[in-house]
Image (tube, helix red, strand yellow):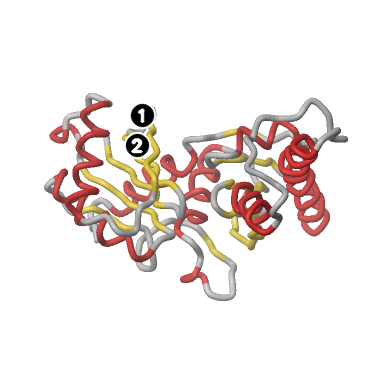
Amino acid sequence: MILAIDIGNTNIVIGCIDKDKTHFIERLSTVRTKTELEYAVDIKIVLELARIRTQDLEGGIIASVVPQITNVMKIAAEKILKKEVLVVGPGVKSGLNILMDNPATLGSDLVVGAVAALADYPTPFIVVDMGTATTICVVDREKRYIGGAILPGVLTSLDSLTDRASQLGGIGLDTPGRVIGKNTIECMKSGVIYGNAACIDGIIDRMEEELGEKTTVIATGGLAEKITPYCRHKILLDDELLLKGMRIIYDKNKRNPR
């Protein structure tokens, strides 16, 4: 069993996973000013709440899109595990054939998501990761990572709307009963929920048109369960996708951890 940490712009996902199952998943807020000790305390508390003993963990791995926190979290995790922790990035073996202009710049979250999907789902596939940004990646029939799209995340768009429109207050993400809203709150909820669902459907349509074939579509991320039920495409929810990808990459590199 290993400790897997996925650092996003809004949340940090912490979990423990082995080859058979994910033992737990928890989310912390991403705080850029925390010290190594503060994050070490966070990790220790999460493990204690999950009743995971550090001596039962063979190692750890981090995937991060927040560079200023990456090394802080690595040091914090190593304080708890007393072992070197792997960080997904250039030079780390993933087994993924990346056909991008500069493969080294591909985000580690996209790498681990694609690696996990390759292990569990048929190609070609599209992975939709709904966090601070909504990222969409495509792996073709030959198992090559060929590219994707990035758009503002659900809450990012909503925050921008409410910040810039003085008459629009904050709203929750519960779904309105209809697409055609009858008041300001209903109209905003419709735009956020159904608008994002329609956006994802539209991008999938266009990507499949470029590929010339249908795809398996997998969704992950904290907001996926709020939006994907209203998409017209069949979308498979997999909240453990990134952790599973980190487990695979850890196994590929554990004889030579970095």
User: Which residue is at the front of the view, 33 or 39?
Assistant: 33
Mark 1 lies on a secondary structure that is strand
Q: State the residue position of label 1.
A: 24
Where is residue 98 shown, x and y percent of the image? 54, 64
**Residue 179 visible within the image:** yes
Q: Which mark is residue 129?
A: none
Amino acid type, residue under disc 1 in the picture: Phe
Give the residue displayed 67% in from the left and 59% down from the top: 164
Quadrant into which the N terminus falls: top left
Between the C-alphas of marks 2 and 1, the distance is 5 Å
Q: Earlier in the sequence, mark 2 or mark 1?
A: 2
Choose top left, top right, bottom left or bottom right for residue 163.
bottom right
* Few, some or many residues within 10 Å of mark 1 (<14, 14–19, 20+): some
Q: State the residue position of label 2.
A: 15
User: Which residue is at the front of the view, 245 or 233?
Assistant: 233
How many labels sit on residues? 2
* Few, some or many residues within 10 Å of mark 2 (<14, 14–19, 20+): many
